[in-house]
Amino acid sequence: MTTRKVMPIVFIALLFWASPLLAHHVMDGELPVTFLSGFLSGLGHPIIGFDHLTFIVGMGLVSFLHPRPYFLPVAFLTGTLCGIFLKLTLMEFHMIEFAVACSVFLLGALVLRGRHLRVANIICIFAAAGVLHGYAYGDSIVGSEAAPLTAYLMGLLAVQYAVSCLVIYFVSVSATNRYSNTAVRIMGVVMIGVGLTFMATNMPISSFS
């Protein structure tokens, strides 16, 4: 296996190892009070959230299948902003973590399937998932002042777009003639497993009563 093919596998593996190594929120669960702390919180939140990180990696893998792959993650980022806005306006959604886990599972199925969809459908999927993830992100910033809130959003959007673009790039330099890389298929299976695990963890107790 060539170095160009090994690099994407190593990169993706490191992304999945990042969450266990950073077991706690970068701000130790405290509300950011400065511009810098808000920015660091935004950078760290998607990386140490295993379900969020898994989705972002999968988003890069799915985007690779379509024209203008570097544009498609913008739909997710837009949805993320909408989700955070809904959280900041104190709109209450239940089972949000379960819904986020479902989005990881479904995207994993798309990665494993390995076939392109209509771009409009992908944009809708990414945007809807972005709302769910954004609402979950909002928990760590509710009540913050304008400066750290702005910095948080900057860091959050920057790291998510950067990770998804890096995944797209690494897959593009390793792919030969088609989307049949074994490592990519394995990632689809891993994503499905992560989604199922988080779905089970966040399953409402009432579902068993």
Image (cartoon, rainbow, N blue to C red):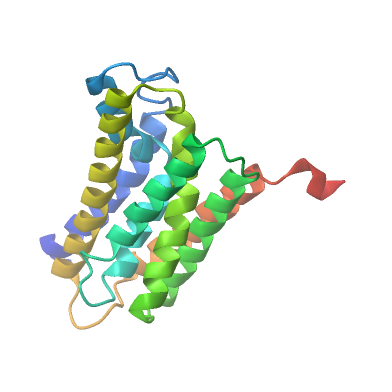
Residue 161: image x %, image y %? 25, 51
Image quarter of residue 7: bottom left
Q: Is residue 150 above or below residue 162?
A: above
Q: Which one is nearer the viewer's eye here, 44 or 179?
A: 44
Closest to the observer: 86 or 130?
A: 86
Task: Name the quadrant of the N terminus.
Answer: bottom left
In the image, what residue occupies the spot 46% across and 28% down?
A: 142
Q: Eyeballing the image, is 158 above or below 9?
A: above
Residue 96 seen anywhere in this rendered image of the structure: yes
The answer to whether residue 51 is visible is no
- 149 left or right, relative to 166: right
Q: How far across and how far down the image is residue 171, in percent?
A: 22, 65
Q: Residue at horizontal 12%, vertical 63%?
A: 4
Closer to us: 88 or 70: 88
Identity of the residue drawn at 37% across and 69% down: 123
Residue name at image x 73 percent, y 44 percent: 204
